[in-house]
Amino acid sequence: MGKFSIVQHFREQWKSLPIHSGDVGSKAVMVVGSNVGIGLEASVHLTRMKPKFLFPTCRDEEKCERTREVLMERTGDDGDGIIPLPLDLSSFDSVRAFAATFAAQPSSDDGLNVLVANAGMFIREYTTTSDNWEITLQVNYLSMALLSILMLPHLVKASTPESPSRLVVVSSLGHYFGAGRLKKAAQWESVLEGVNDKNLCYSGDRYNVTKLLEVMFVRELAARLPTPTPVVACTVHPGFCLSNLFRDISGKWYTRLLISLAGVLFSARTAEEGSRTLVHAAVGPDELAMHGRYLSSCQVAEEADYLFTPEGQAFSGRLWTETIDTLSKVDGRVPEIVKQYLRVD
Ligand SMILES: NC(=O)c1ccc[n+]([C@@H]2O[C@H](COP(=O)([O-])OP(=O)(O)OC[C@H]3O[C@@H](n4cnc5c(N)ncnc54)[C@H](OP(=O)(O)O)[C@@H]3O)[C@@H](O)[C@H]2O)c1
């Protein structure tokens, strides 16, 4: 069981993190949200390891092409194995189209060894998507879950007993604060609709709630994968890092100054330092110890206390059921994949 501790925060922020490298020459690796920030730095590290294929995903074609160029410039790679693919997580249609495009690629014939679901966002204003979900909930949680499920057959295909595939979902220490908004969740008719409700959270809170939902989803998924698992699934906190995550509140000079001050006060990592935690989960050793767990500073760490309470366990179970029901309506492949690849409840 775990909770936020400021002492632990500083201990971790001051830690120097290893740069893991793995033998990925025969592997296909995907990093979602790879044009900037932690995802870009993780993609640079992974490109240097020369995977058979690296699939960096970005919101649109232009960012995809630019990211490929940046990766080639920064690593000296010839770019032959770098296949950028557009993916906008604020649209279920985009996730569905992305999954179809990936499946049609000859480069996906051997499956996918590593999926790093890194993309995430923070926004102040309550904003809805064309799918009628609050945007943070859809981008950080629902689309991440849809993508993970649609990619599951590819992850299983690439898996071997010696080298299970990996699903790495980038969560946050913010998940420790997410439970504060779920105190009355037992009375909600639907947990997803509850989190989606405009009056439930102010936006900063919803970010933390979505990060908690990610931890729950990965734990629920891991519990349903067969044993021994073909796919190691875990969540990662990259540390407090300087990146573009707070772009929504960095429009004014004084908010930019406050963010920079917070960076100094709370000993922020660079995005490159933070990216090492993603690389560790993607290719580092002892992967079986990571299965279903939350990692911080390249080590398995304790998940929020809430997850171990009867209320938290009930919420998590309802979340799984509602997520699968909701996503099954979005894409007919979801129930088939769940039936074929996961244990029945
Ligand atoms: N920075 C931190 O201190 C910190 C701490 C804990 C956890 N995290 C987590 O780390 C992950 C990476 O964040 P970061 O700090 O590197 O932030 P960032 O610099 O803002 O990068 C976020 C990435 O997600 C992508 N993204 C956002 N919305 C998207 C959408 N609708 N569809 C597809 N991609 C989308 C962004 O693409 P665009 O550039 O096109 O928007 C970008 O590539 C996030 O999951 C975040 O929650 C960060």
Image (tube, rainbow, N blue to C red):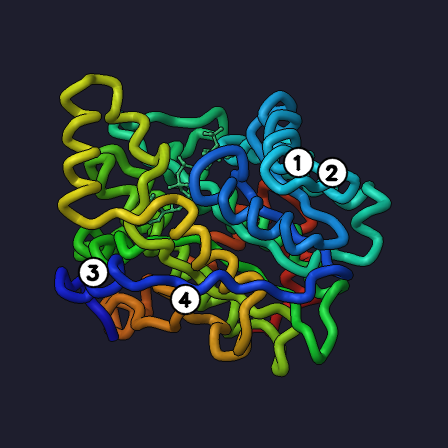
What is the crowding at mark 2: few (fewer than 14 residues within 10 Å), some, or many (at least 20)?
some
Task: Tell which tag, 2 or 4, sits nearer the viewer.
Answer: 2
Q: Is residue 319 above or below residue 38?
A: below
The label number, if any, that marks residue 79 in the structure image: 2
Residue to which mark 1 is pinned: 72
| Residue 74 falls left or right of residue 203 | right
Residue to which mark 3 is pinned: 9
Tag 1–tag 4 contact (CB < 8 Å): no
Q: Secondary structure at mark 2?
A: loop
- Is the residue indicated by label 2 positioned so its CB lies within 8 Å of ligand 1? no
Residue type beneath disc 4: Cys
- Is the residue indicated by label 1 positioned so its CB lies within 8 Å of ligand 1? no
Tag 1–tag 2 contact (CB < 8 Å): yes
The residues bearing labels 2 and 3 have C-alpha atoms spaced at a distance of: 38 Å
Which badge, 3 or 4, comes first in the chain's sequence?
A: 3
Most foreground residue, 280 or 168: 280
> Residue 64 at what x, y percent from top left?
63, 29
Which badge, 3 or 1, comes first in the chain's sequence?
A: 3
Residue type beneath disc 3: His
The residues bearing labels 1 and 2 have C-alpha atoms spaced at a distance of: 6 Å
| Residue 256 falls left or right of residue 85 | left
Residue sitting at x 52%, y 35%: 89
